[in-house]
Image (cartoon, coloured by chain):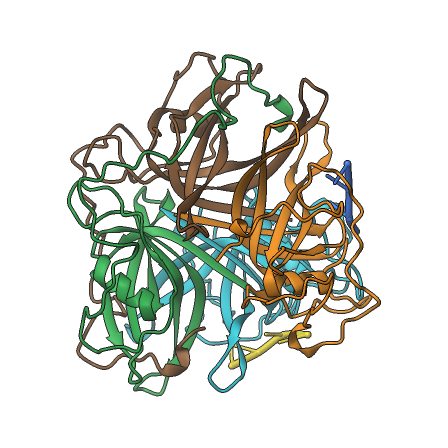
Chain colours: A orange, B brown, C green, D cyan, E yellow, F blue
Amino acid sequence: MLNRVILIGRLTRDPELRYTPAGVAVTQFTIAVDRPFTSGQGEREADFIPVVTWRQLAETCANYLRKGRLTAVEGRIQVRNYENNEGKRVYVTEVIADNVRFLESNREGGAPQESGSYAGSNNSGGGSFGGGGNAPYGGGNGGGSKPSTPRNNNSRDPFSDDGRPIDISEDDLPF
Amino acid sequence: MLNRVILIGRLTRDPELRYTPAGVAVTQFTIAVDRPFTSGQGEREADFIPVVTWRQLAETCANYLRKGRLTAVEGRIQVRNYENNEGKRVYVTEVIADNVRFLESNREGGAPQESGSYAGSNNSGGGSFGGGGNAPYGGGNGGGSKPSTPRNNNSRDPFSDDGRPIDISEDDLPF
Amino acid sequence: MLNRVILIGRLTRDPELRYTPAGVAVTQFTIAVDRPFTSGQGEREADFIPVVTWRQLAETCANYLRKGRLTAVEGRIQVRNYENNEGKRVYVTEVIADNVRFLESNREGGAPQESGSYAGSNNSGGGSFGGGGNAPYGGGNGGGSKPSTPRNNNSRDPFSDDGRPIDISEDDLPF
Amino acid sequence: MLNRVILIGRLTRDPELRYTPAGVAVTQFTIAVDRPFTSGQGEREADFIPVVTWRQLAETCANYLRKGRLTAVEGRIQVRNYENNEGKRVYVTEVIADNVRFLESNREGGAPQESGSYAGSNNSGGGSFGGGGNAPYGGGNGGGSKPSTPRNNNSRDPFSDDGRPIDISEDDLPF
DNA sequence: TTTT
DNA sequence: TTTT
């Protein structure tokens, strides 16, 4: 009946923008959030929490977020599951974000960017990677930063780019 | 740097109280939270979110929560991982709760219990299931408790209806 | 840049539905939230927090909420100010809610209603109190409804008790 | 029963550190949070939200926060009231913070500081303004920043420094 | 009375 | 598999 998450942490990699077969933008990234205490061994640990954004917000995140950036994320916890190639049910827990705030700007030494986007209207999509990424608030994009090429290739990760269509079905589309 | 979750939903089962080898109480349960929208096929789905509580709060939850009960949970997302018996790394995402509110009492037809506990002091543990379940706030009640009348609500309420037009202008309209 | 509030408490009065001159529905109510500690004199105190809802949600609240009901509110803090009749600036702090959950049903002894509404589309307003109060999710129920059995909870639950020791190590112990 | 607030915004002034007669540190500051929409006149507005911190966290905030800094605040809404000098009851709404995160460092062009503090242990206090401000994490304090001298002098503001003891009683002391 |  |  109520499901609300707020996180502040840093991206572990550049975000990955994809499109569903129907052309809806999705971007995924992981945010590292330091724990508020140290482990038994005196080490400061972090939780690595997967985040998913959809549509306009997906494109904004792909355009503006980068590895290492301090970021605030607001959303809800979602647990989806699928059957892997060994016939075993795998559970994936993600934060579906509807609000993302960029707490550090693109420019070196610059101030945090007073931007971010609430989940916006549907994007009729083109399907081409990185296409149509409308900048919010008319801003220059701040650097050669086109959305990073995916680096990982683990068939268990629903977001890995292995040339096959993503395993997020249209059914997972929120709102 | 910040990691906060608030959930309201229902327990899918009775909670399970265990003790670590060192005698620290842990209880786990899963809370079903309905999604705020219907799926493509028009069905209302839910997320099943695992919750973990420790120490005194663990014992209180084990004593007072039951399958089906409406419950509010406050905590943080934790992602731990371990190697399974096939040598594969498995990731487990849980909400570590530090505040749990029982929104329905134990007795049929009763009012929600105005209780719940913040994470408390360490419990040196006994090991026996259900042992030591100290009632919060002085005692089993759960009883005839009709919704408490709000404490005081005299002329101080700025929203009392005194027949004059409201002082909210159109400018205050959000969204 | 981010402003999020979640409250659970009880209404101090029935909600008040008004309409702006342009016919937009607004309802206001105050929610009493017990403090999580007792005062120096050992009394349990509460905060009385004013809540405002707009449009469809305003009408739903006016139709379903009543004095004393346990209610969850999600929204943002707003501080507005106006000049009073003595020419003095008065500051008013309210929670502008975009999500309200009714944790107790209308009928005595009934289960909490699995309803509530996200801020919806504009309502062109009628002006008559209680008009148009569309029940959310198809209808008056409120009835014999014993807590719904959680939808499904088959073998997928990672916390089912299968007799083996739990896989949480002492290292996972927080705080 | 549950009362949680999370804010991200900028300080409108340097924070003000005081001590209660019993020597407990309190600091107050206001955080400006931009609204997520523009007003009818197309202007972007903000809410100015008063924040109070106690004890160790109060001293940390006084030492590290400055006007204009981007800051995350976690806490609860508190509504207290007192009688002003005209015998009228005045309501004051504040966020009592138990977690504050400094999202911008003290150094120009530097990275956000991975610090902040959870509400800590009591401080037996000295009573002298600015005394005893133990730096967290052993850090140098980062600049000529001694706690700002108070600037405002409105007898209605419980935090104004007019030479009289503050009107926050020991009773308001949380936890 | 306000921050970028 | 991870961020500063």
Of the pair B139 and D132, the residue shown nearer to us: B139
When asked about the image quadrant of residue D101, the answer is bottom right
Say which residue appears at 52% left-offset and 45% top-offset: A78
Say which residue appears at 43% left-offset and 59% top-offset: D168
| A132 lies left or right of B11 | right
| A150 lies left or right of C142 | right
Of the pair A100 and B17, the residue shown nearer to us: A100
When asked about the image quadrant of residue B174, the answer is bottom left
Q: Residue furthest right?
A: A144
Tell me residue B93's x, y (percent): 58, 36
Tell me residue C151's x, y (percent): 38, 36
**Up/down of C27 relative to C7, above or below:** below
Residue A141 visible in the current orientation: yes
Of the pair A2 and B87, the residue shown nearer to us: B87
Tell me residue D28's x, y (percent): 53, 62
Residue B153 visible in the current orientation: no
Tell me residue C140's x, y (percent): 20, 52
Say which residue appears at 49% left-offset and 65% top-offset: D50
Of the pair A65 and D160, the residue shown nearer to us: A65
| B160 lies left or right of B90 | left
